[in-house]
Image (tube, rainbow, N blue to C red):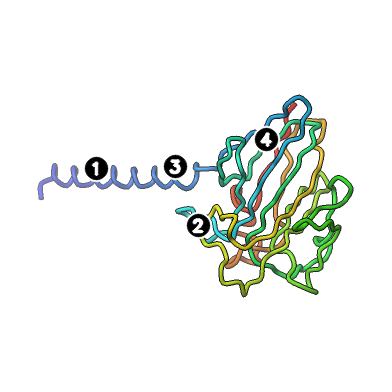
Amino acid sequence: MSRTARLSAVLAAAVVIGLALAFLVIEYLLAGPPTVAFAATAGQPVNLILQADPVSSTKQHPDWVSYFVKSPGGDWVRSTLWQLPAATKVNVTIESYDTCTPLRNPIWSQITGTDGGMATIDGKATSTVDSWGACGPGHTFSIPDLGINIPLVGISPADTKICTDAPCKATDPHHTIVFSFTTPSAPGDYRWQCFIPCGLGFLDGNGGPMSTIGYMTGFIKVVA
């Protein structure tokens, strides 16, 4: 092979490697979830509707547990970044499709930070969830800076119709948790996450989806 041919082969290989690296960066490192924005209307509350799903159905991590949010347009979006107006009541509905897990720390079984210190689970008002006496939480929805913690009751692992394709359908087995809170008057970013180790295959269950934006952790951006 001539020197020119060898040089051409090296350059072609370099181009292929460069394109592959660019694809990896764009597809995996820069591809973050969108921020879904909600606006207040004439002092009316904002309705925030979420799903906690046992799968994400993404190319990168199809079997990671994940949250979905219903956009103002009515579409389910896999995002954990939500923009909310300041000093506004937020009515939250979370559909819990994942299976239950006994809590390592019973403090996460307490419902805190909501209006009246309560939530309804399948229509029944409650202030705590027993994670050992029955099928307990599968995840929590927790905003530490706002003192909010909501244990999300999971379905039985023995159920034969567990959701396998996100976003889950209303006909899939699930529990519905409803509560309200008021956003702070001061704008800011407030981190939220699940505090039940749900990163299977990672050390102590605290890696993977549990610590990744777009799956089981995110931010509420409060704006004026």
Which residue position holds label 3?
Answer: 26
Which of the two labelled residues, at mark 3 and mark 1, occupies the earlier sequence position? 1
Which residue position holds label 4?
Answer: 83
**Residue pictured at 71% horizontal, 39% vertical:** 47
Q: CA distance from mark 3 to mark 4?
A: 24 Å
Q: Secondary structure at mark 1?
A: helix
Which of the two labelled residues, at mark 2 and mark 3, occupies the earlier sequence position? 3
**Residue pictured at 45% horizontal, 53% vertical:** 59
Residue type, label 3? Ile
Q: Secondary structure at mark 4?
A: strand
- Circles 3, 1 touching at the beta carbon (< 8 Å): no
- Circles 3, 4 touching at the beta carbon (< 8 Å): no
Q: Secondary structure at mark 3?
A: helix
Residue type, label 2? His
- Circles 4, 2 touching at the beta carbon (< 8 Å): no
Q: CA distance from mark 2 to mark 3?
A: 16 Å
Which residue position holds label 2?
Answer: 61
Q: CA distance from mark 2 to mark 1?
A: 34 Å
Marks 3 and 4: which is nearer the front? Answer: 4
Residue 155, percent from left and from top: 67, 66
Residue 35, percent from left and from top: 60, 37
Marks 2 and 3: which is nearer the front? Answer: 2
Give left or right: position of 2 versus 196: left
Q: Secondary structure at mark 2?
A: loop
Vertical placement of 188 versus 169: above or below?
above
Residue sitting nearer the eye, 119 or 63: 119
Residue type, label 4? Gln
Which residue position holds label 1?
Answer: 11
